[in-house]
Image (cartoon, rainbow, N blue to C red):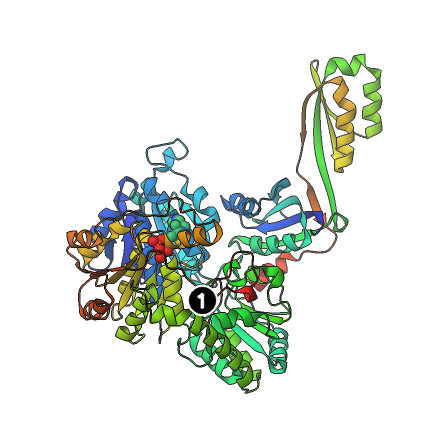
Amino acid sequence: MKISGSEAIIKCLLEENVDLIYGYPGGAIMPFYDSLYHFQDKINHVLVRHEQGATHAAQGYSRSSGKVGVVIATSGPGATNLVTGIADAQIDSTPMVCITGQVSSNLLGSDAFQETDIIGITTPITKWNYQITKASEIASIFSKAFYIARSGRPGPVLIDITKDAQFEMTDFLYKKHKKLRSYNPKPEISDNSISDACTLINKAKKPFIIFGQGVILANAEEEFRVLMEKTGIPSAWTILGLSAVATDHPLNVGMVGMHGNYGPNVLTNECDLLIAIGMRFDDRVTGNLNHYAKQAKIIHLEIDPAEINKNVKVDVAVLGDLKNTLPKIIEKVEEKKHEKWLQKFRDLNHIEYDKVIKDDLFPKKEKITMGEVIHQINIATKGNAIIVTDVGQHQMVACRYAKFNESKSNITSGGLGTMGFALPAAIGAKMGAPKREVIAIIGDGGFQMTIQELGTIFQTGVPVKIVVLNNDFLGMVRQWQQLFFDKRYSSTEMVNPDFVAIANGYQIESERVSKRENLKESIQKMIDSPNPFFMEVVVGKEDNVFPMIPTGESVSNMRLS
Amino acid sequence: MEKKENYTVSIYTENNIGLLNRISAIFLKRHINIDTINSSPSEIEQIYRFVIVVKVSESDIKKIITQIEKQIEVIAAFFHTDQETIFQESALYKVKSKSLFEERHIQNIIKNSHAKIVTVSPEFFVIEKTGFREETEKLYKDLAPYGLLQFVRSGRISVTKEPLNITEILNEK
Ligand SMILES: Cc1ncc(C[n+]2csc(CCOP(=O)(O)OP(=O)(O)O)c2C)c(N)n1
């Protein structure tokens, strides 16, 4: 029996167990939407308010559930509106399949209405992309797309489908892809690399682990914890590694990077062995590479060969899926404790506590600080919530202070630093993990980049909790202007609307907090609510995030004020 | 700064629309100028071979190669120095026929350069020369004073001295 191309697309989604997609209709994708009408009981389509929101929602969904996020949009402006989210998913290795409608194949290249070369545009920001012009291609291309998106180092894939291919009738036979001869998602593990790594680990006096999102993407949190505990090695997270192990674990010594913790940054330049696990030495992590861990031997456990020696030259590269490499290493390493060395991290973190953290979490000044909001949220949620952050000061503060007991709980735009990420990502995160509390922490600037997704929350009723930390500034940029541009606040002050009134317009229960004595109670009210909840917290206008490694500086020159 | 050198990049790929874009984007992203590029079928049926020449540092070319290999439809990518490859470029020169008959000297140039005359017509004739860049360039310089109607040079084509074992790579996967 023949079916239409658009129905074939839906059958493909069902074959891949997709029951939730984010999208926005339009001319070139209308045949698909018409077929979808008949499958509403099997596939839940969330109508976002802007296609960018669909991509971030799909990312949030993927990051909280581990599944592939699916996005659908029309040609031209619908497709170009996906670009930011695709770039974000590419740099943060998020599995996502985007489907875009395209003008009919006979019109391709003619500058037809809403024709855009989305394949050309997304080539550098996708793991793979493909334009379908015949319905008979649909089954094999979709199966390939899902396989590529989720295997190896995950990433976004885009499929562009001409309108005539959606109408065309075709036979349908779905075969799941298990391999491609030109693609090697899991590099073979070299036994030599394992034994070389273990020799270095067993010899090291001052070993130090930095773990990234690779641990989460490989579902290797348990293996990682076992390795850390067996070797007794102090371990620090990158922003995307956060929540892979409990934040309160005694061997977890904090965050590396520009606004990370003092101990792990400074001691990066004192360890004798640096073990990088599923992380990629981003410049926000390393600071000046000429002064980065030069004294240390370096081991890099990584699935993507292109990351090896890209930024930092390593002594031993252990290529492979962490789920397979970690157990091999655990087997060969000696049980150890590094009490004295660990104490050094604690000592430095104590200095940071006295100079920075105490005043952030327990401020004496009149205005509420971002840090105390996160602290109160920790208390109210007991560290069991998923925290979704946007980009800016509030993001750094949240990632520094939020407590996590469970993996896949920290969702943020790390590599691209996309303002506007958090609100739609929180919608997706909640749908990906409906039983969990999901709290979005957003700045007043970033909130207004995708504020229209309040409409999606209103329409779906998805019970996300939104906290806008309002400093009436593009805070992070203002901080740099203060520190590095002699306080010339060029275009960073924001005249903001009444956010609570806007939330009320969408019938979302809301609250504004500007006094410390109301903070705890309001947070509790927000957590207790079974519905979406919006909370604006008025924070100090010119507070800064410290500590900080200024651009171009070495990690050991971290500033505490 | 690390020394830059000419590298010949050989890339074996599946046949797919858009792959050229994907590969060139990797150079574009690093602000690297592609000196020459050539794409053709390879020794294996249905598999294509790109030959790209760029001038970069050794550490950069290594990173570029892994980033090219990471592309889904790339089977394998290699880089080689000039010493490690046998390479040639072809050039075509279109000259007014009048000059061939009026300028005796031009006939000597052609003879000495070991170039081949491909076509002669009453209006123009076409010379072909295959060789190293310096050779095709020398002929260009020699002919230029007599008026070149058109000139074109191909991208480098090259084979490596060492075996590349693509069939084995394909069988392993
Ligand atoms: C889409 C986008 N545009 C610009 C920037 C640059 N940028 C980084 S942080 C920041 C300020 C964010 O301000 P706000 O959302 O109010 O958060 P705050 O820093 O005050 O917490 C800006 C403009 C960005 N990261 N993303």
Asked if the beta carbon under badge 1 is closer than 8 A to the nearest atom of ligand 1, the reply is no
Picture layout, residue A19 above or below residue A115: below
Seen at 23% across and 61% down, the residue is A514
Q: Is residue A207 left or right of residue A532?
A: right
Residue B49 drawn above or below residue A256: above
Name the residue furthest front.
A365
Q: Is residue A272 above or below residue B123?
A: below
Q: Amino acid at mark 1?
A: Gln
Residue B144, image quadrant = top right
The front one of A459 and B106 is: A459
Is A144 left or right of A265, judged from the image as shown? left
Tell me if A238 is positioned left or right of B11 in this view: left
Mark 1: secondary structure: loop
Q: Is residue A173 visible?
A: no
Residue at 51% from the left image edge and 54% from the top image edge: B72
Count of labels shown? Answer: 1
x and y, in percent, of residue A234 in the image:
51, 78
**Left or right placement of residue A434 versus residue A392 in this view:** left
Q: Nearer the viewer, residue A27 or A440?
A: A440
Give x and y (percent) for residue A227: 50, 80
Q: Quadrant of residue A80?
A: top left
| Residue in the image at 26% along x and 74% along y | A380
The residue under the point 61% across, 70% down is A298
Q: Is residue A17 visible?
A: yes
A61 vs A97, nearest the viewer: A61
Please determine whether, in this image, residue A441 is positioned above or below residue A223. above
Return the x and y of residue A127 as percentages of the image width and height.
Answer: 46, 54
Q: Which residue is mark 1?
A: A213
Query: Residue A464: x percent and y percent?
Result: 24, 63
Kindly identify which chain the residue marked by label 1 belongs to: A
Circle 1 packing at 10 Å, graded few (<14), some (14-19), many (20+), is many
